[in-house]
Amino acid sequence: MTDTAIFDIDGTLIDSNYQHAIAWFRAFRRFDVTCPLWEIHRAVGMGGDFLVPEVGGKALERDHGDEVRDAQIEEFDRLIDEVQPFEGAHELLREVRDRGFSLVLASSGKAKHVEQFLDLLDARDLADAWSTSDDADRSKPEPDLVASAMDKAAGTTGVMIGDSTWDIIAAGKLGIPCIAVRSGGYGVDELRQAGALRVFDSLVDLGTHLDDTPLRTPTS
């Protein structure tokens, strides 16, 4: 029995992963660290507290971690107006809500970015709640953000919809299954190996096959 749908925002509902990767690249360059964009992209979906040491190194985290994260926010602010929702995002959220699920949108991003994304998705009247980095002590792949989303929805059993292995790992630590979409740039095999319940090519593809997932109805 599933009563709550937790949707990741960046890379799942909003096509923002590559803008995030560029923003991280530019933030690292401010501190004379050049990281290949493909390595940064592979880490997008982690929170900045994990991404900086993972990609930029432990020394950079020790000496400038918070400064790098602040720089990334500044760089992403310059790119955010280019970001758009994925096809079918609003329609899928509405359908899931109309089926009777509690709906929570979750992001490890900053609250000001999430607020803009809610408007892009026209989702303020659809979502029961939303979570940001302000709601979690630790970011993905730790489960804090997913736990916060469940608490806000007052749900008993949830399913997460995400685009990255980090989403799947975080949800799995709470025993919550994760449906994956390939919009984050991850391959089918690696999403399955991370523990994805199902993998779909897009939100439109997922919407067509909702009855084959835990998003059938809240009581089935």
Image (spheres, grey):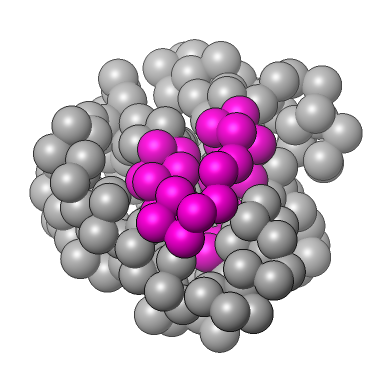
User: Taking 88 as reference, is 40 above or below it?
Assistant: below
State the quadrant of the C terminus.
top right
Q: Is residue 35 magenta?
A: yes
Q: Residue at x 74, y 20 (%)?
A: 188
Q: In the rendered view, tell whether residue 50 sits above or below residue 24.
A: below
Majority SS type along the magenta span: helix
Q: Residue at the location (46% across, 43% down)?
A: 25
The magenta stretch is 20-48
Quick check: 183 above or below 125? above
Image: 21 above or below 205? below
Q: Please provide percent x and percent y for residue 30.
A: 39, 56
Taking depth in this image into account, of 153 and 44 the one nearest to the observer is 44
Q: Position of residue 109 (x, y in %)?
A: 39, 61
Q: Quadrant of residue 71?
A: bottom left
Residue 210 visible (yes or no): no
In reply to whether residue 70 is colored magenta, the answer given is: no
Q: Quadrant of residue 84?
A: top left
